[in-house]
Amino acid sequence: MSVELSKMRQEILEIPDAVDRLLSNGADNIRHAAQLARDADPRFLVSVARGSSDHACTYLKYACELLLNLPVASVGPSVSSIYGADLRAQGALSISVSQSGQSPDIVGMTRALKRSGAVTVAITNNTESHLADATDAVLPLHAGPELSVAATKTFVTSLVAGLWLLAEIADEAELKQAIWLLPGYLGKAAQCDWTPAANAISGRSLFTLGRGPSLAISNEAALKIKETCQIHAESYSTAEVLHGPVSIVEEGFPTIVFAAGDAAEQTTAEAADALAAKGATVFAATSAVKRAQPLPVVRTDHWLTDPISAITSFYSMVESVACNRGIDPDAPRHLKKVTETV
């Protein structure tokens, strides 16, 4: 007897193809935006986004600071839309990320930054949107329609589009090659079996943890647990969790730790083991742990693309948790696909 897959599951399985479409069709847009950025020679970057798109921006913040040595600030859209302030953005490169490209506050802030002198780039799945019209350059995601409320393939393609742009600006040949090889890795990542972690998510609260670019993945994971499984999840840096949040850890407290093959992997593994020693049930996306339980992961050809593989594996797990709890992951309560905030 056939079992009908959720739209979320179908879209997770489509992630490799969506990334392949982006790579096949997005080069001209990437080169144009990269040339604008190089010509502007920005002194800093600002990002404009909400929700999952803001988590994508957190990932790009780390990637930018590590690749280009330029500081990145996340700008609150309400600064413009609610409070009416015009930021002085001369010398900035602005990256706005929105799957729909329609939220008035994102569009308004982007327009305000452009008026004040920033070079503006939009990453969106809707090239006919108000956001696309408001910017100097547009990076279409080429993800195709995303019908599940929970963003999966548009989040991953946002990561890839933004990272590709930064790699092009920095002319990082090794990273660009790793990006081109991602679809094959992501197909394997979507099949990783994280059942032990899924079985541990049975209470009302848990931690997700990461550091550096993997912190952005932790943030996205916590959001997805809340919106698809109706379970409270908090995301912390592994550098911060032991400074106060650890006080709520009790025996069996579930924790998922994200790590990449980067300079933070060892300290991340040590933090995972420290929580396990305090009684938490800790699962970690690294084999460097000694007390925590390692999860199967698909490492890519570059440490900056490893987190993209990890979130793909997580998505497969969290969809199964929602279904096992009798929750429709395609239509979480109180939510709709496009949320337009002012």
Image: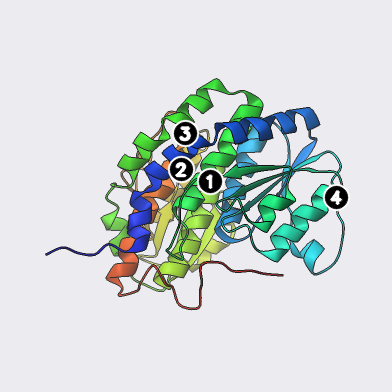
- Separation of disc 3 and disc 4 at Cα? 33 Å
For residue 281, which quarter of the picture?
bottom left
Establish if 6 lies above or below 30: below
- Separation of disc 1 and disc 3 at Cα? 11 Å
Residue 104 locus on image (x, y percent): 70, 65
Residue carrying label 4: 115
Q: Residue at x 45, y 48 (%)?
A: 258
Left or right side of 118 for 188: left
Residue type of the residue flagged with mark 1? Leu
- Separation of disc 3 and disc 2 at Cα? 18 Å
- The local crowd at label 2, few if under 14, some if 14 to 19, many if 20 or more residues have their Cα within 10 Å, is many
Q: Are marks 1 and 3 in contact (CB under 8 Å)?
A: no
Residue type of the residue flagged with mark 4? Arg
Q: Are marks 3 and 2 in contact (CB under 8 Å)?
A: no
Quadrant, the C terminus:
bottom right
Count of numbered circles on the image: 4
Residue carrying label 1: 141
Residue carrying label 3: 24
Q: Secondary structure at mark 4?
A: helix
